[in-house]
Image (cartoon, grey):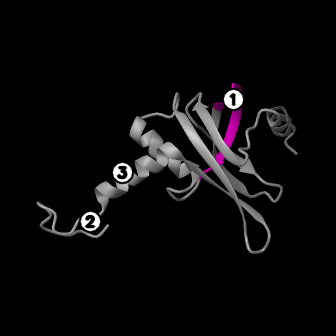
């Protein structure tokens, strides 16, 4: 057992932010730091660690590295791409909870600012039929 690593988890536990259902105003205090989470089964999951301020409390938010633009990670990357940074960004995080058919609860996360950026980029790259100067239609 890696005792030092385990003790680190204990001391961070009280300051780790796990967003609850609702709307949260989030200030990113530092640029993301890459890290990993190792589960009890030994499976390693790549994550990023963010220092954030929520309701005047400084917390650590661990986010799994998602594969899509809709993931929290993907949304944050779009904001970082547009702004050139994440530090100092004020975000509005919306957390919704639904119940699946099997009775399990599932949360979905959306960042208002990211959704606007993603929508703008999608509109720019969509094919516009018969648009002036659009001599060749290229698939997305």
Residue 115 in magenta stretch: no
Which portion, as a residue range, is magenta? 52-65
Label 1: element kind = loop
Of labels 3 and 1, earlier in sequence is 1
Q: Quadrant of the N terminus?
A: top right
Q: Which of marks 2 and 1 is in front?
A: 1
Q: Is residue 49 visible?
A: no
Return the residue at label 3. Answer: 120
User: At x 52% / y 59%, what residue is drawn?
Assistant: 68
Of labels 2 and 1, earlier in sequence is 1
Residue 113 position (above or below residue 129): above
Q: What separation in Å lies between label 3 and label 2 (alpha carbons)?
A: 14 Å
In the rendered structure, are the residues bearing label 3 and label 1 in contact, judged by CB atoms less than 8 Å apart? Answer: no
Residue 79: percent from left, percent from top: 46, 42
Label 2: element kind = loop
Label 3: element kind = helix
Residue 127's disc is 2
Q: What separation in Å lies between label 3 and label 1 (alpha carbons)?
A: 30 Å
Q: In this view, does 37 lie to the left or right of 4?
A: left
User: At x 74% / y 43%, what residue is drawn?
Assistant: 18
Of labels 3 and 2, earlier in sequence is 3
Residue 54 in magenta stretch: yes
Pick out the residue farthest to the top: 56
Residue 41: percent from left, percent from top: 81, 60
Report the predominant secondary structure element of the magenta stretch. strand
Pick out the residue farthest to the front: 22
In the rendered structure, are the residues bearing label 2 and label 1 in contact, judged by CB atoms less than 8 Å apart? Answer: no
Q: Is residue 1 left or right of residue 132?
A: right
Q: Is residue 135 visible?
A: yes
């Amino acid at each position: 057992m890696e005792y030092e690593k385990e003790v680190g988890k204990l001391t961070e536990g009280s300051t780790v932010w796990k967003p609850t259902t609702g709307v949260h105003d989030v200030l990113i205090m530092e640029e993301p730091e890459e890290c990993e989470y190792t589960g009890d089964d030994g499976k390693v999951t790549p994550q990023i660690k963010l220092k954030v301020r929520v309701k005047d409390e400084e917390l650590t938010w661990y986010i799994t590295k998602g594969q899509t633009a809709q993931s929290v990670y993907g949304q944050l990357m779009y904001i970082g791409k547009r702004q050139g940074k994440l530090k100092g960004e004020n975000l509005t995080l919306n957390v919704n909870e639904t119940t699946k058919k099997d009775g399990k609860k599932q949360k979905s996360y959306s960042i208002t600012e990211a959704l606007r950026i993603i929508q703008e980029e999608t509109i720019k790259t969509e094919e516009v039929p018969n648009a002036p100067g659009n001599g060749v239609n290229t698939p997305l």
